Amino acid sequence: MVVILRSGTEELRQRLHREFEAHRRCWEMAAGATGLGQVEDRWDALTETIWQARAASLAGAAAKLAMVLSASQSRSDDDEFPWPPLPSVVADLQRLGKLPDSMVSTSR
């Protein structure tokens, strides 16, 4: 595969890379100053514990699935597979387990 770059493309790529790195460093400094990094680490540890735990009930399984939906979907209107049918699976689990809406929610 032969790639032909227009004049100035490499300079533009380098400039954009430098700008991106500057923004990333700013973000990391702000995250460190506000404690966001520690919160993310704690969130990751807690969710990992949940993913590893075996559900002891239909409600627990439905809650884990709802958490996956809430934490993983990039947009609430994402129409790419597998996202569209998954809320219906949660609704089925809710209905079959006679779970209240407040117990299992897929809203983001």
Image: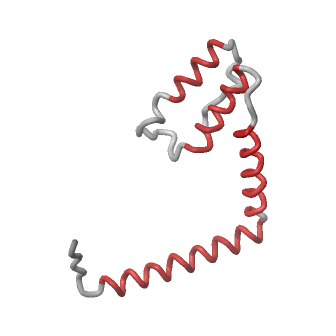
Q: Vertical placement of 53 versus 35: above or below?
A: above
At 45% from the left and 40% from the top, the residue drawn is 78
Q: Position of residue 3 (x, y in %)?
A: 23, 76
Is residue 24 shown left or right of residue 80?
A: right
- Quadrant of the snapshot with the C terminus: top right
At 42% from the left and 84% from the top, the residue drawn is 14
Is residue 47 shown left or right of residue 93?
A: right
Q: Position of residue 61 (x, y in %)?
A: 68, 26
Q: Which quadrant would residue 31 be assigned to in this image?
A: bottom right
At 54% from the left and 23% from the top, the residue drawn is 89
Decide which of 67, 53 is in the foreground and name it. 53
Q: Vertical placement of 18 versus 31: above or below?
A: below
At 71% from the left and 18% from the top, the residue drawn is 100
Is residue 72 shown left or right of residue 102?
A: left
Q: Vertical placement of 41 versus 92: above or below?
A: below
Q: Which quadrant would residue 25 be assigned to in this image?
A: bottom right
Decide which of 74, 52 is in the foreground and name it. 52
- Quadrant of the snapshot with the N terminus: bottom left
Decide which of 45, 24 is in the foreground and name it. 45
Q: Position of residue 13 (x, y in %)?
A: 38, 80
Decide which of 4, 78 is in the foreground and name it. 4
Q: Position of residue 28 (x, y in %)?
A: 67, 72
Q: Which quadrant would residue 33 be assigned to in this image?
A: bottom right
